[in-house]
Image: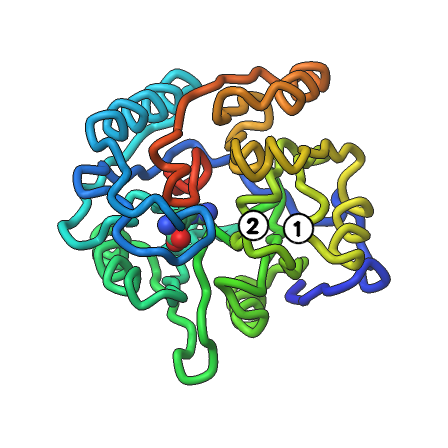
Amino acid sequence: MAQLITSAEELSFSIDDIPSMPLPKEVLMVRPLHFSVDYVINPHMADQVGNVDKIEAQNEWTLVQSLFDQIGMKIHIMEDQEGLPDMVFCANQSLPYRDEDGNRHVFMSIMHAEQRKKEVPYFEQWYRQRGYELHFLDEEKIRDFEGCGDAIWHTGRRLLWGGHGFRSSLDAYQMISDTFGIPIITLELVDESFYHLDTCFCILDEHTALIYPEAFTDQGLGMIHTIFDQVIEASKYEAEELFACNACCPDGRNVIIQQGATNVTKNLRDAGFAVHEVSTYEFMKSGGSVFCMKMLLW
Ligand SMILES: NC(=O)NCCC[C@H](N)C(=O)O
């Protein structure tokens, strides 16, 4: 069922028509020993160069890790590398997938910024050692693709949502759709503060999403509202300053989210989700929060 969908009129299926996919039970996290803000590649990093409190960052990361542990995820830890201060954001270097026969696949990213390109081979090696089938995009034709920063699996379904515009090219999704044989709903991003799809779009369960609407085009919003029965909206303050949409809900029930997003957390609780708040202030200085700090694995 390979297909790229770019508008609501092209949506010829409902979510129940898409083959099911198991929930991820494992996460990969990268220890942030060398995490810092050394350069500016997104608007959140402006004025933050040299501002990271490294001890605080370690403490925050450890708490995020313990929350994933508490909700029952198996955790894999990779060590980071000196000179790669963004490596901790391990949602970005790859897109893993487990096919219907149980075989593990991964597409490796083409990082947009030169400063992050050297991160990818460390992840490539990690997947290779674990027997994944590796896939590579054609670097001659495709400018960039930043893994699960922009490509987000629909909870429990073989359906991918693909953000493009700032860090990933629309072209990347054609090859991914053809290789995995899955439909991809593409969403153009229009506000550079929300440069990755995971900064403005969080799938909570099969029928519920949390979004920052202003980050999308009308076409994109049309597709989101067609697929999801329930769409919770974050305000500009909670989305931009508190990265509320960069929450992570791996099991359709437990949501791990930056603390202080009062309205979003209330709406999540009212909708029946178990909310776990955590501080990721040091990582937000670099433009990321909970969702970017881990890779979900199947
Ligand atoms: N949003 C994400 O998925 N990742 C955060 C990446 C932050 C990093 N400083 C970057 O701009 O690439």
Whether 224 is drawn above or below 268: the answer is: below
Residue 280 vs residue 20, the one in the foreground:
280
Residue 276 vs residue 236, the one in the foreground:
236
Please state which amino acid type lies under the numbered disc 2: Phe
Q: Is residue 133 left or right of residue 53?
A: right
Residue 4 coordinates in the image, percent (x, y): 67, 67
Question: Farthest residue in the left direction?
Answer: 82
Name which residue lies at 21% across and 52% down: 129
Name which residue lies at 26% across and 25% down: 56
Name which residue lies at 72% across and 31% down: 232
Q: Is residue 173 left or right of residue 213?
A: left
Q: Is residue 119 left or right of residue 164?
A: left
Circle 2 packing at 10 Å, graded few (<14), some (14-19), many (20+), is many
Q: Are marks 2 and 1 in contact (CB under 8 Å)?
A: yes
The mark found on residue 194 in the picture is 2
Mark pair 2, 1: CA separation: 6 Å
- Of helix, strand and loop, which one carries label 2? helix
Disc 2 C-beta below 8 A from ligand 1: no
- The quarter of the picture where residue 147 lies is bottom left
Whether 156 is drawn above or below 150: the answer is: above
Residue 286 coordinates in the image, percent (x, y): 37, 44
Q: Is residue 25 left or right of residue 128?
A: right
Q: Quadrant of the N terminus?
A: bottom right
Residue behind mark 1: 215
Image mark count: 2
